[in-house]
Image: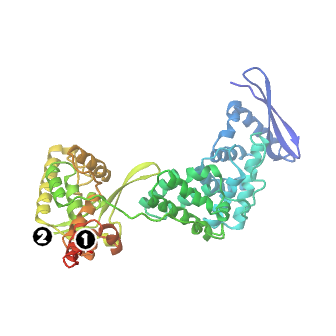
Amino acid sequence: MINVAGHLREQNGTYQMILSWKDTTGKRRTKSISTGLPVKGNKKRAESLLRQTQKEFNPETMQQVCDLPVSEYFTRWLRESVMSLPPETYGRYAYDMGKVIMPYFEKKQLSLKALAPRDLETFFRYERQQEEATVQQLLDWHKELSDAFQYAIDSNWLKVNPIKEVDPCLDNSPVLFTDFFMDWLKMMKSRVAITTYANYEIVITRRIIPYFKPFNYTLQDLEQHPKYIQDFYQHELDRGVTANTVIHYHANIRKCLQYAFQIGMIRSNPADRVERPRKEKFKSEVYKAEELEQLFKVIQGDPSEFGVIMAAFYGLRRSEIVGLKWDAIDFENKTISIQHTVVSTKVDGVMTEVARDRTKTKSSCRTLPLIPACEQMLNKMKKEQELNRKVCGKDYCTDYLDYIYVNPMGRRIRPDFLSQHFPDFLVAHQMKRIRFHDLRHSCASLLYANGVSLKEIQEWLGHSDISTTSNIYTHLDFSSKVSSANAIVNIFPENTKV
């Protein structure tokens, strides 16, 4: 137990606590801590505060205060200021800290020593723009933060008050593009579907932020030099990223900067002044009728059998296959309704399955005929599930009783299973390798080759726009073009000798 001596000293009209102790080497150490109490009429309160501080003082802990997260420092400051502040002032400070300031900085994970004026400017900017704080609120919070950091200076934990030059009511310094992008991403989490947010998060945190962070570009830098954005696109293309992926990056950057423009942080959107890469035309590998016939034979009994058949015959997406429920099957009217989906996505680093009663687009919600072969397969699956439930007893998972596509233990098949297992299955059976999603393209190609119109294919696949159907699938069946060429060649004049 370290013996801490102490006495009071008057300085600039207030009481200072002078603490003294010996360190582990036997060397005498001293520390000055402000009580914040005016000298007049506060001697007893100052003496009481000194005794409490002597009792709780731990030199090793005090040396680590600078490494504390800012929100934890605020908690400590409030605890140690309870006796030095008037009750009314302390109550207001504690309320504002607990409701506004500390929750904000808890998300930032900044230490006291790492806190910079820019971080405080970002806080006030957030409160002005997102929470619509009044001028008086901003000024009150500025005063409270100033007092909190002054305590750190008086205790020799900080040398300079980081809030000294910060105007809570004005944007008086540039904002780093990467900082703004991350704040925008957090804002979007509550405004878009969780799967959309997950896509944003992957692109922004893994690609865009790592590239721009070393440059320390501000929003104003990008506004004045759109070439910085263009350089990023070229960098990605040079390292082998596809043009379509870079276009996806551009969409994220443009949307973020458009928000910065809307709230007045920049006067124009620099993303509108760069050249996007030209979109690459999609080309897919597909299975022809004879290849599908072979696949249907060898896939029998495999866990992916149901998924493969539904993708190849009905052209369903994997989210639609895994999301099929028993109430979507109308055995009486012989129909299948596509209305529920399940997708896998990583949110904040955690893989999550999102089930929802809606499809990718409004047009994706569709009703298709139930063919006899599929009806027979579904009846067989239903009997197997009932038998598995009896055999497994209490070990059978009952969370997914409504779903069709479950494993023998009752757990719903993961969407990722189909994408990962299918290519491996093809390699093992020495078949042409295609992606699982290419079964959907194979379905469309087969329909087109058999004279089904683009409009009918669009409705079968659930595309929202017929141009999507046309752009993706019309090039897949070359045999129809050969037939057209043969029809013309019959009337083409023969070559004559000169």
In whole angstroms, how far apart are the C-alphas of marks 1 and 2?
41 Å
In the depicted structure, whether residue 209 falls above or below residue 359: above
Q: Nearer the viewer, residue 128 or 10?
A: 128
Q: Nearer the viewer, residue 98 or 440?
A: 440
Badge 2 crowding class, 10 Å Cα cut-off, few under 14, some 14 to 19, many 20 or more, is: few
Instruction: Report whether residue 189 is seen.
Output: no
Q: How many marks?
A: 2
Question: What amino acid type is highlighted by mark number 2?
Answer: Glu
Residue at image position (20%, 79%) is: 491
In the displayed structure, does residue 261 sit left or right of residue 281?
A: right
Q: Residue 256 at what x, y percent from top left? A: 56, 63
Q: Earlier in the sequence, mark 1 or mark 2?
A: 2
Q: Residue furthest top?
A: 26
What residue is pinned by disc 1?
Answer: 481
Disc number placed over residue 396 in the picture, else none: none
What residue is pinned by disc 2?
Answer: 332
Q: Residue 305 at what x, y percent from top left? A: 19, 53
